[in-house]
Image (tube, helix red, strand yellow):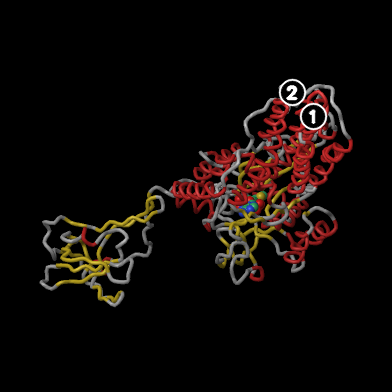
Amino acid sequence: MSEKFYITTPIYYPSDKLHIGHTYCTVATDTMARYKRMQGCEVMFLTGTDEHGQKIEDKAREAGVTPQQFVDNIVEGPKGVKDLWKLMNVSYDRFIRTTDDYHVAAIQKIFRQMYDKGDIYKGTYKGKYCTPCESFWTESQLVDGKCPDCGRPVVDAEEEAYFFKLSKYSDRIRDLLENTDFLQPRSRVNEMIHNFIDPGLEDLCVSRTSFQWGIPVDFDPGHVVYVWIDALSNYITALGFQNGRYDDYAKFWPADVHFVGKEIVRFHSIIWPAMLMSLDQPLPKHVYGHGWLLLDGGKMSKSKGNVVDPYLLAQRYSADALRFFLLRSFPFGSDGNFSNELLIQTINTDLANDLGNLVSRTTAMAEKYFAGTLPAGQRADEALDGELTALASGLRDKYEEAMERYQFQDALAAVFQVIGRANKYIDENAPWALAKDMDANGPRLARVLYNLLETIRISAVLLTPFIPDTCAKIFDQVGACEGCRTWDSAKVWGSLSAAVTVKKGENLFPRIDMEKELAELEEAEAAARKAALPAVEIEPAVEEPVDFDTFCKSDFRAVKVKACEAVKKSEKLLKFTLDDGTGTDRQILSGIHKFYEPEDLVGKTLVAIVNLPPRKMMGQVSSGMLLSAVHKEHGEEKLNLIMVDDAIPAGAKLC
Ligand code: MSP
């Protein structure tokens, strides 16, 4: 029976389109899943979306749709979560949505089971709450009085709620973290012990009454299950735990590893095992807390508006190039700084130069010197070949050792060390010089090319989990049969038949002109950001009411523009001299120079409130205010002064 391997991504919040940070975690998980499949394991790779909570409820209200419609669009709609994973070649086996019926029913059973056991009880919640992060914090966890995750203000919260007796499991969790390799990398263990276990675990609030968009507690209407029980349980409900939809729980649980970002390590390494202990279920074997992709040194987040769009990058450079970049450039356990320069540089150096050139030079030479098929009679030279063949033969072990530690960067570095050695081997053996005397050197030349093809083949097997499409092309080009593409064959030097036939294809990764591309990419990103903004945006109405009498005191008049000029030293202000029907000129200043040239307004009849107290702006007096309509189009502010028919006499009262 083949070995089982169960791996998961976090389930993502569909409160916005996903960005490159989410893509990073999913691509890492996909690469691991593909690697394990290649090794012959029976793999279950689960991903999905975490669809409940106040933030989604709020966002849906803002968008004027139901929460279900809102999440449906982000998950299943165009360029949504599923489209993104398809574009990125993500080979998940199962996709769970926490709004799926079977999950909802299972959560109700799980909640009741924990309640019946006495691990969930009713109390009053008092604490600090960060709405965007949907996290409760104790006073001591706040940083400068703000949310420690996102730095935004928190609010006091108090309400009737159910609690999970997390404190009961404190000793067992400490033991799990300190004395096993459950949580990786090891540095994360110290964080958890210092920040959460040592100060004493507090019981966890697991239900809310202040919003509706959640799974109802079936024995206490009005309460919905608060996110973490709902979200974390996805890893078992998706296998069929407490539901009849799937039947893989016995087969795949416990999970081999949950990949999660560092800010949710706390939930996965403390709350999740405690929940499983309460349910008397086995614990996952590992939780791996990876680092963040940073932009300009800060965490990307849609609400801060500093996100990188994976869609645009994958469409521009290919999914493989983006997948490769993400895992080659940053150590998985630490944070990494994303930049367009680094992306283009990595594509150029590793993919175009080192890998792409090695494949195209080797196949081109095999075609040129041997019409594509190497002769079987070849002459080896241990002194010249030994280092390359030894490196390539030992590559799989080195690679495997790194992959088993989830160190994708190290695994790729090992492969690219061999690719670099192969490029040097070409220069050392100068095939073009050997080709000058084919009678004497033909067998040697054939061996040089064979060694290169073998090195490429082994590298391609090991690169397949990272860049599957590219490797399929490489195998075709170097004439690798099915049996030469397998995990087993990566350990066997000499798998290609000596008389192999190659077929040169087009360049795998064309070189990119950095300067030109950076400029074009920035333009494309700006255009995409603009297109993603709502076509027309209107400021929401002020909810604070104005009483009718106060409103009626405002005096709206038609005013005719006698003169208009820009105010010196001001970029924004225009000075209007207006006929307001009183016989005395009225002066109003208005910050609309961005939208109008003064000469275009002379002679127009506008609408002004004339009984506002005079104000001084840039040393000039303004008596009143001109009315205009404001809105945004694709994020750009638009303003139109309200004008009335020129036949309306100056001073006419408007009501
Ligand atoms: N819904 C919860 C997870 C529940 S799992 C039972 C959640 N969702 S999330 O959409 O906010 O984040 C999902 C994952 O994306 C987290 O692991 C988070 O670390 C990761 N990332 C979000 N931004 C990221 C970066 N900029 N860089 C790397 N990963 C980041 O939390």
Is the distance from the Cβ of mark 1 to the nearest ligand 1 atom less than 8 Å?
A: no
Is disc 1 placed on a helix, strand or loop?
Answer: helix
256, above or below 268, in the image? above
Query: Gap in Å between the C-alphas at discs 1 and 2?
Result: 10 Å
The quadrant of the rendering that contains the N terminus is top right
Residue 445 circle label: 1
- Residue 477, located in which quarter of the rendered image? top right
Total tally of numbered discs in the picture: 2
What residue is shown with label 2?
370
> Relative to 142, is 539 on the left or the right?
left
Q: Tell me residue 454's x, y (percent).
A: 79, 32
598, above or below 229, in the image? below
- Residue 251, located in which quarter of the rendered image? top right
> Relative to 420, is 62 on the left or the right?
left
Mark 2 crowd level (few <14, some 14–19, many ≥20, 10 Å Cα): some
Q: Tell me residue 405's x, y (percent).
A: 79, 48
Q: Nearer the viewer, residue 483 or 168?
A: 483
The quadrant of the rendering that contains the C terminus is bottom left
Q: Are marks 1 and 2 in contact (CB under 8 Å)?
A: no
Residue farthest along the right direction in this orientation: 382
Q: Tell me residue 144's x, y (percent).
A: 60, 72
Q: Nearer the viewer, residue 602 or 276?
A: 602
Residue type highlighted by circle 2: Phe
